[in-house]
Amino acid sequence: MGTTLLEALNVRVVGSGEKFLVLAHGFGTDQSTWQRILPFFTQNYSVILYDLVCAGSVNPDYFDFRRYTTLDAYVDDLLNILDALRVDRCAYVGHSVSAMIGLLASIRRPELFSKLILIGASPRFLNDKDYHGGFERPDIENVFAAMEANYEAWVNGFAPLAVGADVPAAVREFSRTLFNMRPDITLFVSRTVFNSDLRGILGLVKVPCCIIQTAKDVSVPASVAEYLKTHLGGRSTVEILRTEGHLPHLSAPALLAQVIRRALSR
Amino acid sequence: MPTLVSLARQFLTDEAARVLDDAVAVARRRSHAQTTSLHAVSALLALPSSILRDACARSRNSACSSRLQFGALELCVGVSLDRLPSSKTADEPPISNSLMAAIKRSQANQRRHSDNFQLQQIHCNQQAASVLKVELKHFILSIMDDPIVSRVFGEAGFRSCDIKLAVIHPPVTHASNFSRTRCPPVFLCNLTGSELGRPDSSFPSSGREDGEENCRRIAEALVKGKNLLLLGACASDALNRFIECVNTDGGGILPTEIAGLSLISVEKEIIEFLSEGGNNREKMDFKVEELRHKLEQCSGPGIVLSFGELKALVDEKLSSGALSYLVSKLTGLLEGFKDKLRLMGATAVYETYSKFLGEFPAIEKDWDLHILPITSSKSPIDCFGSKSSLMGSFVPFGGFFSTPSDLKYPLCNVAQSITQCHLCTAKYEQEVTAMLKGSTVSIADQYSENLPSWLQMAQLDTGKGLDVAKTKNDGTTLNARILGLQRKWSDFCQRIHRAQPFSKFDVSQGRAQALVLEGFQYVADRKESSSGSCSRDSLLNESQCANLSLGVHMDLQNDFPKRNSIPITVDSETENVNCQSKLIKEASKSQQKEKDSPWFTPLTLPNMSLPADHTSSSSVTSVTTDLGLGTIFASCSRRPNTPKLGDHREHYQHFLGFNSSKFGISESNSHQVIQPSSCSNPSSGEHFDSRDYKSIKKALNEKVGWQEDAICAISQAISRCKAGYGRHRGSTVRGDIWLTFVGHDKVGKKKIASMLAEIIFGSHENLISVDLSFQGGVNPSDSVFECQELNDYDVKFRGKTVVDYIAMELSKKPQSVLLLENVDKADFLAQNSLFQAVTTGKFPDSHGREISTNNMIFVTTSTIGMGNTNFQPLKEPVKLSEEDILGAKNWQMQILIEHAAEGASGSNGRNVKISRKVTSTTSVNKRKLEGTTNFTEQELNYKAKKLPHKVLGSSLDLNLPVEETEDNTNSGCCDSDSISENSETWLEDFFDQVDEKVLFKPFDFDALGEKIVMEISIQFQKAFGSEFLLEIDDEVMVQMIAASWLSARSRAVEDWIERVLGRGFTEARQKYHSNVKYVVKLVTCRGLFVEDQAAGICLPSRINL
């Protein structure tokens, strides 16, 4: 049945290196989002690609609304994949929600991860007393309402905002993957994401992390990267990318690839 | 807006289009305003052997005869058609929106499942001809989706879902062998559960209510018999909720293993106890005793003791005595009832726990708290109110949330158990179908659960289909767009296919869809409102497709040039410098516009102005004579200091990469002033066209006079390649030329590349310039070079890899010079692509598409040579290095007047000196130069200045950019050893492949500096006379040198000095009309960038006073 899971989540292993590298996509995208990054690593790594169950490329039937109510279910998936592939140690690159998943996974199985590279990561999107996550609860509710009311309009507005930089190709790509998601799943997942709060558990992460943050990201304020750095339990570094947007792997792949490579070699 | 018939027809195969035509005919006959799905049905039924009729016949299950039932059907259709309002007869009643939507849906559907059908066909050994039928089949399927149609069928006693099933499964005899595979609706929890034996799969009621996930996980952890510490911002909420659930629900959420577990919270007692400072120990003891008693009594899974928020236990104000008393009590309890008692608590942050551990180190072992991260405050399901519009529009939600899902499980479990064997599956399928036929409403419910996926699929598909329509509506270049679409979709298909490589899976998916289709029918029947939601969806899709079609459009544009990169061989004569470059430019433009014309016409035009005396010189001897003549002029007029030749010659000898014959020529060129006889020395084995050679060389020399040797080699290499003596690929001559410029002089290299583009391809716009080191984003934004460089990372490469950018540019401009700066910094991808291009003549982009590089000139530059260090050291240390100049900032300039220090007067009639950091007047270590205007001394000062720079390094502004680059190369090196090693060997291999390696000598900035100072001195004396002293800030100097180096015109900087600086001096003189001796200083306004640029040079258009 292990293969079924691998099939269902479109798990691919690309490349010829001895070391494993997991590229985990974020919310609203699927594994194709890495296609511009991927070639930089296939030489030196066996790159594991998979789709989150909420991705548009996964059969929506697999999305169990009763199961995927917290990120832990996603973590289960990730760990099951790694187990099914008999990976005993890997480096992990996670974007957005996958960064959170990676953090949680590394808490559960620290020995499995040699390094976490977190792109556009945020432990908590909502603002709090002494924490600036970038969003207020009412804002979010408005966003959800907008998503419900008119998904397509929301996507068209959200995609350029998220991409940030003026890169039509990236906006197009992101819109495509976002549209591929079933609207109800999108809404459900974003609720899951916005309800998540990893702040308390950051101290449990002992795996060294590299936080990659773009200069301007609508979803993640710059202070969040610093917050992560100070609160993560392991050795962690922050890399600020000289580009904009929440999806540097779409908008500035070459730049990002270099930073990732540097982070991996460290 | 109804759609024109002709437009709709394009989406259909001949067969389906014929049906559509029939439908239109029906509509016309009945004088209906539009052609609807009903018309199509009518047309389909009219055909004696139509697929629909056939399907109806097969799906018929009523008792009456088939003839009778068909009669009824036709009657029903007829009646329904009669009900439609008739209007004035249109020639071709346009296609109604609903029918058009059906067409689009079917198209998308077919695309999505085309591989399924192919598979099926392979499987049952059918003829390939039936592929055409697929289209019609899908068309029918979509028409059947139309609620009106299904109602009509329903009236006639058919179930449209049955018909759809029948349509999907062609009447092949051994159909049961392949088509009855059914997609088991496996959920991942089932998969993982059964695979890993995870306990949660055995929770019968998991997720039955909202917000259960946390509770489920807590329970799961409790099953393992652990003491828990919930950790996370919402941990206490989760804890309270869990307690509440367990206590109110009677443990309903608990898995069977620990059913009957009781949960006691002592949080309140603890807080109370601690707040009293631990004085009331009796009460606490009593509570503990009570617990002990309970534990002794209890049987079964035991008791969970919640101590609540851990924060209460680490409060600073607490008396440690009370706390340790409490802790020891709890520890004692735990030890006493190891099997029965479990502790549970919560904390928001990890720090609290570590603090607690710090105070009670023994706790870690005694309590053995297992940390359970709680990451979610509440379940997303919480947020779905019943008013949610999603609930309305996505019927499935009803299935998921409001109706119990019992029905699904038997189905999927059975399905899972029999996926292995085809025969079994088939039998199972038959049973299922049989059951479906005799189904009641409850099965419809069950269908409705399946619906979401299908509805969604259809939605997506419609979107995709619409997108096709959109592009079509645009009109003009239809065919081309269709081609593009096909490309896009074949890509898409491939991706899908790759993603789901298991045939079984695919087939079964198709099957599952069929089942779901039926389900939809039921829902449509039951719920009239669903059509409302449908229209909403289609609305949604319409705008979605707008987006998609945009994408297609863009893709197309990208694809286009590539397809049209017809190798157009440029006649060597057109490369003549004298020919009208504009013509070629226009020609290439028109070529871009009219992609279809296979040849571009103005090619023959521009070879009229060949120098008559050189036209037929093809013999080797005459070549060399020409050569000599050319260089004499060039070297005499251009070379600033000939005595240095000797040094450079030494460089050449160090540079081993050159082969001797070429070396001979370049040597002869550079030394012909001294020994002209060497010119007659023919370079044996080198053949080239003298006309090319001469013209190229002359043009290059005009622009970049200081690099004669390099120019010589370049022009030679180009003419050699053009004459067909370049590298060969098989038997054919390669049309592309590869040059590598090594050594210094970035600007010179660039200028030469640009000139080559102009000479050979007609315009410097045919230069594609990519700096491969730019990916790191190294370039400081305020540099002088920035104002000319278009090579801005952000603008050009955004969203692309370098390789894709290059590929795109190559396909846009199939005839151009591609300048790749810093090829040694190329990333791995670029390396691969470049190497492939140099060896095969095809440049692959990151998607594997190859772009022919025929007729391109590739110029790669690198500051490092062939890995030999001999190349670097110069005999004489250079006063101004290229790095200094490259670091020049583009700052506004300013003239300051200061009172002169004594003795600061000009001697020798020269009254200009250069000093560093004039702006920082109070600085102690300021290295002010005493009135030295002698040029040799000035040079010394430069040197003296440079030395501390090198030693001190970091503290000096001038060095900032240099450091930056150094940093960057360092980080590049430490990237990964293997990578940098790879790139070194790669570079060597690559250099071995190129046609010519050309060494560039360093630009003589010092000489340029001298010249500039001389000019300034003249201007200054004009304005102020000879008794005043001018101090020029070092940065200004660097800036001027850099600008002059960059400028296209040869006398640009001189002009600037005359016009701008001269005027500045005059104005300053007028303003400070004083007899007191003062020093005039020319400094930069640090941080203030040039706003207004002078014409033709990167310097300010006016000087501030």
Image: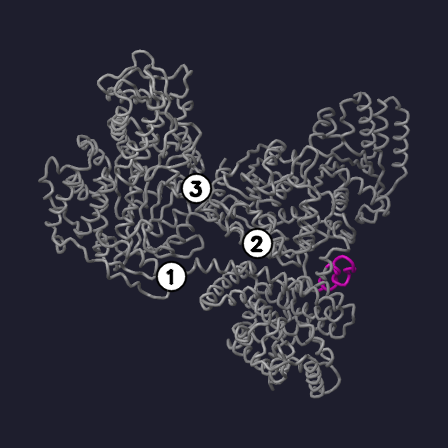
Helix, strand or loop for the magenta stretch, by majority: helix
Q: Which residue is mark 3?
A: B775
Residue B406 magenta = yes
| Residue A175: numbered disc | 2
- The residue lying toward the viewer, choosing from B414 and B655, is B655
Type of amino acid at the residue the image marks with label 2: Ser
Q: Which image quadrant: the N terminus of chain B?
A: bottom right
Local SS, label 3:
helix
Above-or-below relation of B237 to B75: above
Quick check: B632 left or right of B565? left
Q: Which residues are magenta?
A: B397-414
Q: Residue at x 26, y 23 (%)?
A: B1021
**Disc 1 versus disc 2: nearer the observer:** 1
* Place of residue B48 in the rendered image (x, y in percent of width and height, measured from the top left): 60, 86
Q: Is residue B174 visible?
A: no
Type of amino acid at the residue the image marks with label 3: Gln
